[in-house]
Image (spheres, grey):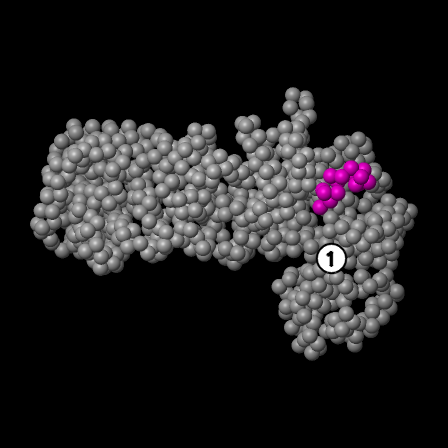
Amino acid sequence: MNPNELLIELRKFVLIKSGLRNIDPGHCKFISEYVFHDTKNYVSETTIKRFFGFANTLHKFSLFTLNSLSQYIGYTDWDSFCKDKENETFSTQSVWQDLKLKTQVVNDVSLITKRNNSGVPFKATANRNFFYPDFDYFLKNDYQFTTISAHPGHGKSILLAHLVENFFYSESAPYKNDIILIVSANSINSIIQSGSNLKDWFLKEFKFESVAELVSYFKKRPDKQEGKFVLFIDGVDEYLSKEKYFKIFTEFLHSVEENSFLKIVLILRTNTWVNLQPAITGSAFLTNSWYKGIFYNTDAHSNVPALSLEEILFTLSNIEGKPIIKSNLSPTLLNLFKVPFWLQVYYNLKSENNLLELNNPLLCYELTSFFLEKKIFLSKKSTEKTYLLKKISELILNESNNKQTVDKEKIFAFINLHPEAYSELLLDGIIIEEKRLNASILTEVIRFINTDIYTYFIFIQITEKYNYKTSADFFHYIHLNFTPQNLLRHHLLNWSIRFCINRNEIAQLKNIFKLPFTNTEKNDSFDFICNVSMFELNKQNSHFNRHTIDIEFIDIMVMGRTMSSLYKDTIKAVSNHVLNDDVQIMLHIIECNIALIDIDKVALVNTMQSMKRNYKKLGELFRINPYDLILYFYNNIINKSTEGKSLNEKVVKLCRQISKSEPKKNTALTTLEMLTFELILSTLYAQKNYAECHRFIMAILNEYPSIFYIRHAVFAPILLIQLGQTYLKLNYLKKAQRIIQFLDKIISSEYSFYTQFIIVSFDILKANFHNSTQNYKQALIEINEGLILAIKQEFKLPQISLMLVKVESLKQSDNTEEVSNIIKELLYFLKLHKISMPEYTNLSGGEFEQTFKVLKSFKQ
């Protein structure tokens, strides 16, 4: 045996003694401890890592190390181990077995490298066993070679590692006696760096001048064959991009004689395979002996499909150390993880920053940013690479094609300026070259391998256009130049939100709501603002922090009040961090609103205690102290009667003041006023003081004559719904109908801003209207639509109100059995959530008062 063969034998026995079949870097510490325990010789963890190929070996292993490891497995020293193995080999080893042992040395190093390069622990990677029947068929039949071809990052090398383990190395491997040889880019680099060439290396290691000679030897001596010889060639794309090596490789393929035992597996990028195919198809022998496989996609030139849902969840469950299911992931992230490479990026990001959950849509953007920072912005030639990527993305955008490609000839000038940077972008899998046949003309095109990276560089160009400053013009540019409801515009808005919050330019985000973006885009943007805000609050050295949060952020939270669980979490998170007293006070008011809608007595009491400590400050900031208004609702929840005479006098006085105000433009309306007006109107309505409620709305309309035409905040539809409900109570049915018609127009307008909470509240208004006009059938339609949405969004107050309206509607239509069912459903809901049914939940007519009192007093 040569020294390499003896080392591989020693590695094998150290693993066996340590109780390991495979090894990863984490095991080296334990092996070091085991060796010390058994021999009292200390071999460091670093030395063990070098011994198993996890770290660079710049020199031979010391005799102390080899003696210690030999003693660990039961020998006196390294010399006795070598003599024992030499005697063993001399007496028993055939040519085939000798070749098998020699290739094992090369393969072990290659496999360790591939497992380390997987980006995630190898045991966490999916084994892609979709390919196993295909590969088994290839081995058993008369095909000379097959390909594993895919774009960069699609897990070709990991698939190879799993194939080798499953078919050749595992305890249940079906082809244990076959010889395999893995020739990879790393092994070729090592050979070249040592001053040798492949031919000399092959002769030195395996005693054959070439693969062709090896084939010829065993063809002449079939009795010496003990299985198949499987040659894996992986990661040589960089070499094949050079004409010299490409020629050598194609000559090698043509030199392989037809035989029954040699199998060649080429692991290539699709663009390399496209370039190689003409050389294959030029040979009848190679064409007939190429096994495509059932997964080969002729158009894509690939036979490695995207990861399946099960494979993604398997890897994530191993990374997270707990079961992960589909609902744990945002749809965008699930789509991203279909490419194995992004699971590697996630694993690396998670090791540095563990703040983001898998269901958070921000994670996709953080992954892209993290990857580009490591691979582009902190790399050599980062300026040149960034320049090229911006130019390519600009040209792709100008092409306006769905395939997001640009002809290579259009960027020749830029490539020639920075050829090395361009080559590295190709090798790193940032961009790819593809051949396309258009109108019988073969063209070469370039595209980004990942759409998110392309979008990022489009965004970078927009920020450069506006000197890295967001503004109304910045957002207007996005609105004007990108198609509504398009994924590209969606991503650009999200990148912009992340950019603004990173730089604490919160005020600029209002432009998204003020400009005519679609309602869906505004709602998605609002949710993304919430996600980014919570993430930034927990980051170290963030510009958006407890010291910098101001009224601008509160303005947005009030503009887009959604009452979703995300909104509630955001308000809570910011409230727990903020240091600005005025902002803190307004957050407490929003928290109280949330508690009232959730009918959460505990949360309401806790927040009110904080508010009470700032009672004087509240009185200075607001025209009417909001604590007094919220106290009314608290008493309502605990069934405590309150006259509210003093409060009503303050409301009437304020109403008169507002009525006498000079008309103002909508731009003068403040967040403080919106919070005050909503609380006052809710209080008056809950008190059944409908006439005063109407007067107060008219006073607001006097001060802000165009207030109903606000389209960038939810305040206008909330005010209109309140007016509609008030008209119903005052029996102004035609006026209520006109309000409903007006709201229908607002909601049908694609550019108005309204939320799911507004839709549910509007359903309650329409149901009440139809009950008031005795159209009970239509009322039930509105109620059921509202209930579906309220249940989905977990809006507790609207859900109770809708069930009460449904009871009234069913009673009026004499549907006794259904009345009984909905009452049972209501009572079960209250019991399940351990909540009461305060007076302000009843939005039905006067005749329903007695029914409500009976239901309210019923104890289960």
Q: Is residue 93 left or right of residue 593?
A: right
- Quarter of the picture holding the C terminus: bottom left
Q: Is residue 277 depicted above or below 102 in this figure? A: above
Q: Mark 1 belongs to which amino acid?
A: Asp
Q: In the rendered image, which residue does mark 1 sit on?
A: 108
Circle 1 SS class: helix
Query: Residue 119, relative to residue 701: is it above or below?
Result: below
Direction from residue 776 to residue 410 in the image, left or right: right
Q: Is residue 198 left or right of residue 840?
A: right
Percent across and percent down for residue 747 are 30, 32
Tell me the chief SS of the magenta region: helix
Residue drawn where x is 82% and y is 63% of the image:
3
- Determine whether 821 is above or below 782 in the image: below
Q: Where does the image place residue 496, in percent across and percent down from the top left?
A: 44, 40
Q: Quadrant of residue 69?
A: bottom right
Front position in the image: 514 or 845: 514
- The residue stretch that appears in magenta: 235-249
Whether the magenta-drawn stretch holds residue 184 is answered as: no
Q: Position of residue 635 (x, y in %)?
A: 16, 54
Q: What is the total number of numbered labels drawn onto the structure image? A: 1
Question: Farthest right residue?
Answer: 220
Q: Say which residue appears at 19% left-offset and 56% top-offset.
A: 615
Across and down, in percent, residue 572 comes to: 33, 53
Q: Is residue 619 visible?
A: yes
Residue 445 appears left or right of 825: right
- Which residue does the image show at 27% across and 36% down from the upper left? 667
> Which residue, as the protein is rendered here, is positioned at the far front?
467
Which image quadrant: the N terminus?
bottom right
- Look at the image and say whether residue 244 sits in the magenta stretch: yes
